[in-house]
Amino acid sequence: MSKRPAQACPPAAKSARQSDLVSEMILNRPAILYTGDVALPKEAAVSSVFVVGQPAAMKAFVAAAPEFLKQELSNFVTAHDDASSATVSRPSQIVTMIKQTDLTGEDKFVKLVLINIPTEASRHNNPARPDAVAKALVKFPDFTAPGIRAVHVFALGNTARDAAVTGISVGRAAFRFNLSTKRGAPCEMPSPKITVGVWSAESGPASKELCEALGVVVDKMRMSATLTDMPTNFLNTTTYVSFMERLVGDLKALGRDMKMNVIKGNELEEQGFGGLWNVGKACTANPPALVVLSWNASNANPDDKSIVLVGKGIVYDTGGLALKSREGMSMMKRDMGGSAGLLGAFAAIVESDVKLGKPLYFVGCLAENSIGPNAFRMDDIITMYSGLSVEINNTDAEGRLVMADGAAYAAKRLNPEFLIDMATLTGASGIAAGHFHAAIMANSEEVEKAAVEAGRKIGDMVHPLIFCPEFHRAELQSDIADMKNSVKNRTNAQVSCAGWFVYENMMAAAKTEDIKYLHVDMAYPVEFMDNKATGYGVCLISQLLGLFNDCLPQ
């Protein structure tokens, strides 16, 4: 066995340096500027112009477009008016060069890309087809290649909401995380300066309020996607906590009433977090942690109700002693995507100062499901924070264990009126709801309908599955504990069973039966776009909790 090479710096110094690197890469990336102006930005020499949207919106935009675009745009619209209906189900595009006069008065050639999105959109889809917009744009190196360049996108829609969703999809396609080199020589990081002009046939240029809201939400969506794309040697439980500290500091600087509490390592065991502690205890280098962020809670009374967001933050999932295969383990860096989506939504809502009328909490359940002498085992019986005992029959069903502790903590300590959890929890969610919709489960028809409507309106789509504990409780039955952590029959509503496990622990810890509960399993939409994280969940929760209420028709 070869000896481990000497470290260049002490572990603590290395950890601090890595934490700074993670924060710098995410928080200091160029922001996307959203505007209602249909002219090109004057302060930057634009190298490429994109026009993307629904065919009818593109046709309506011809009259309002800048002069240098009108002829090419009119020709494109005319050609597609005369084309067959085959273009309805797939996007069509042209790429050409046009002459544009720069700020010095000199003529130069600018790349122009015109993209018609499909008009086919069923009742379970968003009419602006955000999936098609993001997939079309992400293929262009203007958004992803190394170097600094200025890109302008006209995001069009039939309605103001369609245009907003198209604008969000532009942000989803923009670069986030890439450490490629040129034969070992450092490359300049991709740093496109992107401006997005938002325009609709219904309302014309987008309002200032809508552009500001889009800027905040898309920034946090890209933050979430970058976190989710980061490998675990960059983003582990230690650096994730440090990043949240930086984020909280930035929100405090805006004058927001913020607090952060971290329970980590042996403190979790001492305070009874049996699920989170057991899952993460094998990773001694970066121990598990429960991170609680609060907004507007300082002056809350003990009886005041709250909204709580509980996110699964498994920074890497080996499966534990139920070890995954090589193929199954690949990309398990994204098993913290639920926590990243809710963290982004939390930050967007706080920065936008949404009037919730009650405190808002984020509870991040962070751990690495690793292997080692201290790893928890099949057949172990552990006691959860709720007080329930659990017989472990699958160490690779770890997400529900950490989230159950987070939900129980929220129920016992934070007095939730509404609790939302989000996780990359089950492969079965993709079988049930497909790769583009998260699978949801709710104990309230009102919550279920609101979530479905919010997802369809903003493009983070969901599809409801059944909430029926009396049918599914038996799947987790144990003869020697209160429950097992994995189902007996994998063909019997796995997604609902996993959600019920979290719900049961929450209710065991609750002081009341009156908690509205929404479970979001987004194992597939977390990464549907050319193997890149999508930042899923930020837009869904922002829409659901009212961030767009004052700037878009509801």
Image (cartoon, rainbow, N blue to C red):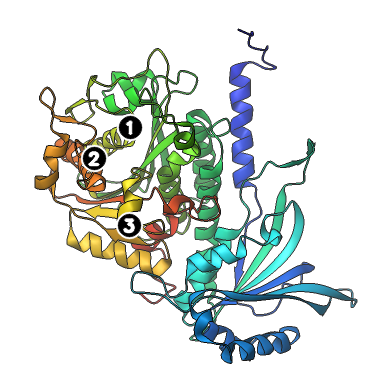
As drawn, the label of residue 398 is 1
As drawn, the label of residue 433 is 3
* Tag 2 residue: 502
Instruction: Check if mark 1's residue and mark 3's residue have beta carbons within 8 Å.
Output: no
- Can residue 4 be seen here? The reply is yes
Q: What element carries label 2?
A: helix
What distance separates the C-alpha of mark 3 from that of mark 2?
A: 20 Å
155, above or below 432, in the image: below
In front: label 1 or label 3: 3
Instruction: Check if mark 1's residue and mark 2's residue have beta carbons within 8 Å.
Output: no
The C terminus - image quarter:
bottom left
Q: Which of marks 1 and 2 is nearer the N terminus?
A: 1
Query: Seen in the image, is 549 located left or right of residue 162?
Result: left
Q: Which amino acid does label 3 sit on?
A: Ala
Q: Which residue is drawn at 41% across and 54% down?
A: 537
The N terminus - image quarter:
top right
Q: Position of residue 348 (x, y in %)?
A: 46, 55
Q: Which residue is drawn at 47% across and 30% down?
A: 237
Q: Which of marks 3 and 2 is nearer the N terminus?
A: 3
In front: label 1 or label 2: 1
Query: Seen in the image, is 98 located left or right of residue 416?
Result: right
439 or 414, which is in the foreground?
A: 439
Mark 3 nearby-residue class (10 Å; few <14, some 14–19, many ≥20): some
Q: What residue type is labelled 1?
A: Glu
Q: What residue type is labelled 2?
A: Val
Q: Which residue is drawn at 21% across and 39% down?
A: 501
Instruction: Check if mark 3's residue and mark 2's residue have beta carbons within 8 Å.
Output: no
Mark 1 nearby-residue class (10 Å; few <14, some 14–19, many ≥20): many
312, above or below 390, in the image: below
